[in-house]
Amino acid sequence: MDKLTRRDFLLTASAATLAAAAAPSLAATSSTAGMGRQRVLVGSNTADGILAYDWEPATGELAPAGVAAKLDRVDWLTYSEDRNFLFAASEVHTFNGKSTGGVVSFSVVKGELKQLSRQNSASVGTCHVALDHTGRVLIAADYNGGGAASFLVTDGKLSPAVWSEIYVGHGPNKDRQEKAHAHFASFSPDNRFAYINDLGKDCIHIYKLNSETAMLTAAGSYTAKPGAGPRTLHFHPNGHTAYSVNELDSTIDVLEWSKADGSLTLVTRIELLPEGYHGPTRACDTVITRDGKFVYIANRDNNFLYSFRAEFESGKLTPIARSNCGGKTPRNFVLDPTENWMLVANQDSNLISVFRRNTLTGALADEGKSYPAAEPMRILFA
């Protein structure tokens, strides 16, 4: 464990590798579950794929617990609501002998993962999976291939793709928007609509969802500012506000969701970058507290977290402060179940950084602790 300051928060890849090699086996630490510890899974962009850690909520300590499952290049993980099943996105170019990315499901038995099914996505580079509110439909988004697919889930097992689409088009950013790049899938609060963020086309594709069959039917789209690159979409607990993080210009589109037709309408756009900053930048992900009072955004390249106070009824965001993310390239970040701690997956620093959170003010501590993790892409609490 290392302390982090603004000037000292990088960890070398070699240190991460050594720590992983020295980690105890998954089974050896399963007995700690009754001692107040919680299991944390980390998606890793390596051959090991899914790493296991034990979390101590009283102190904010992470202890490595080995490899939970070997699966190449795991970009995203999501649980079923009952935590009996886990679903993973594998950002590979060949899967099951075909030129696509992969989607894999696992059963969770006494803290250990047992593979149940594995299916091909629509195209290469599967970077995200999302499970609908019924637990019957999984959608996968493929960044490199620009496609998306839906799957029917039965007792944790995935059907072959029920629906799929390869998007066509591009945006004005020649380096990043040379073609469509599906990046993120989500569902409306009432589960009647599905959304797929397309970073390459500057839009969010909207679909009517049939949760019995996993079929999607086109229902329009939301168009972002040209060159913005909408990456993720998260719905506020108020049931009508959504936040779309635009990666390429580091902004947030605050959106009004229509229950009638699933459409999204721009309310306001918020700049994330400090005044006068003109270097490389990539906004990333969003965390919303359970009570809806606070919203946090991660930004990469200049590497910070941005805290906001949220007005519950309107979803309006008021800035609190930018703070240290603890490393380089915060790919994903989450609050622990107590919401007293923020954990950040710093992909290019090979570490997970932990910061205490003030639950009354929403402020994040600027100094935290770091723990080795090989190319962390996603943090998930059991």
Image: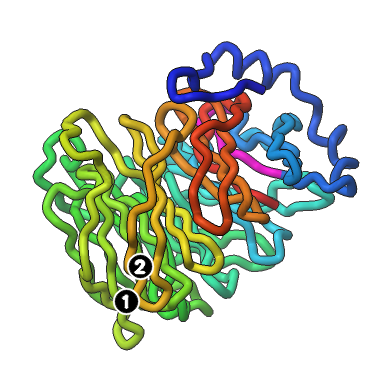
Residues drawn in magenta:
40-47
Instruction: Identify which residue, 371 or 248, lies in the foreground.
Output: 371
Mark 2 burial class by Cα count in 10 Å: few <14, some 14-19, many 20+: many
Q: Report if residue 259 lies within the magenta region.
A: no
**Residue 352, above or below 136:** above
Q: How many marks?
A: 2
Residue at 59 percent of width and 36 percent of height? 354
Residue at 65% x, 33% y is 70
Residue type beneath disc 2: Ala
Label 2 SS: strand
Q: Which mark is residue 242?
A: 2
Residue 44: in magenta span: yes
Look at the picture and state if 379 lies above or below 205: above
Q: Is residue 23 visible?
A: yes
Amino acid of disc 1 = Trp
Q: Which residue is mark 1?
A: 257
Q: Is residue 277 above or below residue 338?
A: above
Residue 208 spot, x, y in % from top left: 36, 78
Instruction: Classify mark 1: residues with Cα within 10 Å, few (<14), some (14-19) or many (20+).
Output: some
What's the colour scheme?
rainbow
Residue at (66% x, 61% y) in the render: 156
Q: Main secondary structure of the magenta part?
A: strand
Mark 2 and mark 1 in contact? Answer it, CB < 8 Å.
yes
Where residue 303 appears, x then y in whole percent? 37, 33
